Image: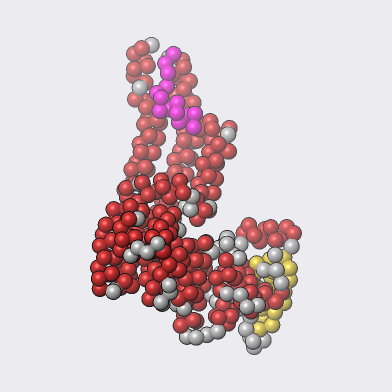
Amino acid sequence: MLKKVSLTNVHTGRKSALVIDTDTDAKALIGSGKTQVETAEIADIKGLDETIQRLSASKKNLDDRVVLFNGLAKCFDRNIPIIKSFHLQANRVKTPRFRGLIADVADDLAKGEKISDAMAKKDDVFTPDLIALIRAGEEAGRLPEIFRRIGNSQKKTSRIIKKLKSGMIYPAVVMVLGIGVVITMSFTLVPAMSKLYQSLNHDLPAATKGMMAFSDILLKQPWVVALPIIGLIAFFKNWGKINRLKFMQDMFIKIPSVSNLVRKSAAAVGFRTLALLIEANVRLTTALDITAATSWHYHYKTFFTKVREHIMSGMTMPDAFLIESHWLGNDGRLICGFMETAAETGADTELLNEIAEDYEDELDTAANQIDKLIEPVTIVLLGSMVGFLVYAIYAPVFSLGDALLKK
């Protein structure tokens, strides 16, 4: 349910209105971030107004997630009570979904629930691997560090997505202009050339026929063109769920350039979590079990689960890593070498953190260069499209001499 909270400052009279996605007035007050110098009026948003608000309001986004986790980390560092820490984030987030989420989680915490259990109820916002990571922080007593890591990770993801979006603006504009050119030429130059070629009993060039067919689809069956656009929107909207399908993870891990990024991302999360738990003196088998739950890629989830089984049967960690190293890809032997060194020196956490830091540095470098990787692909695609349009439009003119000679 959506609720509208109108806040009025008692000193200045200044008013502001906020929309919160929650079910009670008490939670709506928490989600609004009401202060002691403000009065509040709460109204339910129902029926058509609610539908319009949900369609037009900002959806849950990565920026709010970054703000929430980084803000909680700062509060926990300064020993601010957990419930108050959540209350303090209400004025920092921007979407009705996150305002309501903060209120709901704070209410569950007031009833005695753990942070991980309260957040697990919001599975449309917090994925299972995030919840497992939060549980690891609770187990190790390192929630501020975990929240800061999640916030930084989400910030990097947000930066990559923004780069991708900005990189797609230019191609999108050119494609719209290209479609406009196709429709315009289909109504002006092409019909005249088509009649001329018919009078000469000569076929139009294949490229021009293709452009005319595409124009007919745009004019007579526009929904056919809308299908791939709707498909792409649905794909990116449900990317989190799609990315967790085994066949999709297998597909990505087989693509040469993408495979490296996928493996390093999954390994960095896994080894950093394992180091954190071992450093907090969590039992090794329990640490491996939690680490497996935090791994978003099933190769690494399987790897840590298998290592745990080997250790429970009496095997050492280096040997267990060596047996299951095939799950780690090309870096498997390298990581096993690190673990052998760790076993001899007793520096398990240092070396696990070193592996994670190396992978995170490589991922940061790749993220900073992603716009440079998009640019050449964009140029090739746009060049091909523009070249095809130019050829399709001018091919009848260039071929007119052959048609006349044949006549």
Q: Is residue 370 visible?
A: no
| Figure label count | 0
Q: Position of residue 106 (x, y in %)?
A: 61, 76
Q: Where is residue 348 shown, x and y percent of the image?
A: 31, 71
Q: Residue furthest top?
A: 407
Viewer-proximal residue, 188 or 174? 174
1 with respect to 279 (left or right): right
Question: Viewed as shown, does residue 271 lie left or right of 17?
Answer: left
Horizontally, residue 80 falls left or right of residue 333, namely right
Taking the magenta stretch, the answer to whether it contains residue 187 is no
Main secondary-structure element of the magenta-colored stretch: helix
Examine the rendered structure and indicate whether residue 403 appears above or below residue 242: above
For the record, the magenta segment spans 201-214
In magenta segment, residue 205? yes
- 273 shown above or below 331: below
Of 64 and 101, nearer the camera is 101
Q: In this view of the protein, which residue sits in the foreground, 208 or 275?
A: 275
The location of residue 208, given as percent across then percent down, is 42, 27
Residue visible at 45% across and 19% down in the picture: 196
Q: Residue at x 70, y 65 (%)?
A: 1
Can you say whether 346 is above or below 364 in the image? below
Query: Can see residue 47?
Result: yes
Residue sitting farthest toward the front: 314
| Residue 226 occupies quadrant | top right
x, y (%) of residue 19?
65, 69
Residue nearer the viewer, 399 or 383: 383
Screen quadrant of the C terminus: top left
